[in-house]
Amino acid sequence: MRSAEEIHKIFLDNNITGYRLEKDLGISQVGADKFLNGDTKKPFKKTLELYNSYIDNDFKAPGYSKSEGKIIDVNELPVKDVYVIPIKGKGGLEQAYYDDLALNKLNIEKLSIKKPSSNGSKWFKIEVEGVSMDDSTNDYDGSKYSLAEGDWAYCRSIPRIHWRDKLHINSVKVFCFFHNTRGIIFKKVKSHNTETGELLLCSLNKNKKEYPDFTINVAECSYICNVIKVLSEF
């Protein structure tokens, strides 16, 4: 994988701007401009992976298909309403137990998706609060599943019929739970008792004294979601 310095030089040599990176990759122009201006001293690993893929794909947007040699028409893709939940908007939702009346008061964005989702699934764009799922350190940028405070996570709800025994905890690395007492939480599922519905949850942050594992039950949740995509400032 190319280093940040190599990527920076390639972008400058090819006149890649922060505006273009925002449009093609769906990232923050502010964060992209900081990288291009040399103000980001230690970019996240997942950001470097995204930039490397962008270069490998000849600076094409993710919708570009090499095999077909054409841009996928986004107008032909399914469009979903996405409920936007900032940190300051979580309290009211939790107090209302995530009732539809409360959800319908949220701002809604439109999102084109490449594949149809399950019937009845809801989509959310949630601002990450806290650092329990941030596994970066002074010497490590963090895994591609790391969630830093201020990141935005796109999440798709899982139909309740699958909660008992089809959460696919080995393939899904991070879940988002709309828990009726703990609030909206992002966690990795360590184990799942398919008979009782109990889930053992853990944080990615290595400080287990501050962020210990704990157990919840699927019956205590209003929504359980897969984290599909994360937008970072950097």
Image: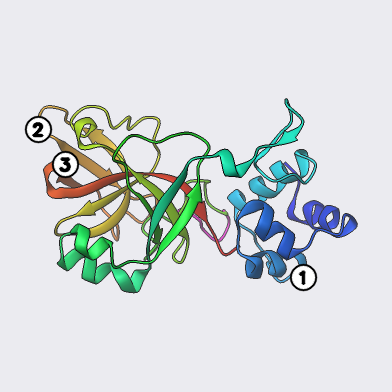
* Quarter residue 121 falls in: top left
Left or right position of 96 against 29: left
Q: Which residue is mark 1?
A: 37
Q: Quadrant of the N terminus?
A: top right
User: Total number of numbered labels?
Assistant: 3
How many angstroms separate mark 1 from mark 2 (CA)?
A: 53 Å
Proximity of marks 2 and 3: CB atoms separated by less than 8 Å: no
Q: Quadrant of the C terminus?
A: bottom right
How far across and down, in percent of the image, does residue 207 sit? 36, 56
- Specify the amino acid type for callout 2: Thr
Q: Is 52 placed above or below 147 here?
A: above
**Which residue is the site of mark 3?**
218
Question: Is residue 199 or residue 108 the one in the foreground?
Answer: 108
Q: Name which quarter of the figure residue 56 lies in.
A: top right
Q: Is residue 136 magenta?
A: yes
Q: Is residue 232 left or right of residue 32?
A: left
Q: Secondary structure at mark 3?
A: helix
The magenta segment = 135-140
From the image, state whether disc 2 or disc 3 is nearer to you. Answer: 3
